[in-house]
Image: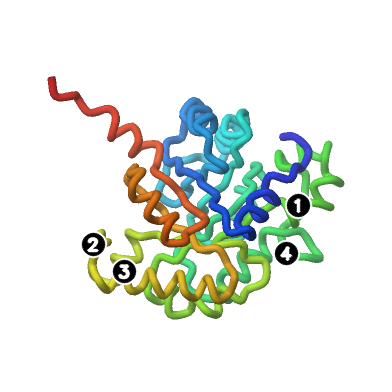
Amino acid sequence: MAEPDNRVAEIRRKMRNRGVTLGSWMQLDNPSVAEIMGSAGYDWVAVDLEHGHFSTSRLPDIFRALELKGTLPFARIAQGRTKDIKQALDAGARGLIIPMTESAAMIEKCISQAFYPPSGTRGVGYSRANLFGKHFDAYAESHAGQILMVAQIESIKGVDNLEEILAVKGLDAVIVGPYDLSGSMGITADFNHPSFKKVLEKIRSLCKAAAIPCGYHVVRPDPKQLEEKIDSGYQFLAYGIDAVFLIHQAQVPEI
């Protein structure tokens, strides 16, 4: 891994200026797929450690492949556990998406676990993130500004506590997980339901008031829906999933 750069700062600056950062999602544990995704033009790609089937030992290769064309490797961790956070960051993740964020205390703990003392409580050691010690000093001094922290809002409980979540120091953005959020409302995948739309409006409103960028995962590739989300004010957007891209394009054509 190269010495720390300013790409995370560029994403923060883009969102601060009301711009959009567009990323994507990976569930397939394959460096070649990562290389394809990394060369597709996204700012970042989140490796899904919650629903994907990645092994920890493969993460460095996945992250290297994403980085070949300048795409930042992010990780959606499985849970907000110390081990999950440490392993993803030590392997070289430059952003963390915390699933099922439901309280300020939860995201505050995760943010603390992402950074070395005195800023946080992350274990300090040589790892791929600092090239196994070669860039240790530079990484230790600059990493606090080089890791993007995102809370994923996926339940009504998270929405109910969102105002407190948004006040947590060190939070860069939130992103809606539409399937789990709609499921928690008893209307799984019914994204046109008035109640779901009302909840999305509440999330956007609270984020705007707190000056925290709001995001959304457009799971099924649909340029029109992506454009609608951007027009609605979403700034931190994930588009598609590697496996879903494959499914959509791999079908036998009608001839």
Secondary-structure class at tag 2: loop
- In the figure, residue 178 lies in which quadrant? bottom left
Residue highlighted by disc 2: 190
Residue at the spot 42% in from the left edge and 36% down from the top edge = 28
Residue that badge 1 annotates? 143
Whether residue 237 is situated above or below residue 34 in the rendered picture: below
Upstream in sequence: badge 2 or badge 3: 2
Compared with 112, 84 (above or below) is above
Q: Is residue 251 left or right of residue 41?
A: left
Left or right, 230 with reference to 80: left
Disc 1 marks a residue whose amino acid type is His
Query: What x and y, as percent, mark residue 122?
Result: 71, 59
Label located before the other in sequence (1 or 4)? 4
User: In the image, which is nearer the foreground, mark 1 or mark 4?
Assistant: 1
Residue 249 in sight: yes
Q: CA distance from mark 3 to mark 4?
A: 38 Å
Image quadrant where residue 92 sits: top right
Tell me the element at label 4: loop
Disc 2 to disc 3, C-alpha distance? 10 Å
Give the mark, 1 or 3, whose residue is nearer the N terminus.
Answer: 1
Secondary structure at badge 3 equals helix
Q: Which residue is mark 3?
A: 197
Outermost residue, top side: 255
Q: Which mark is residue 121?
A: 4
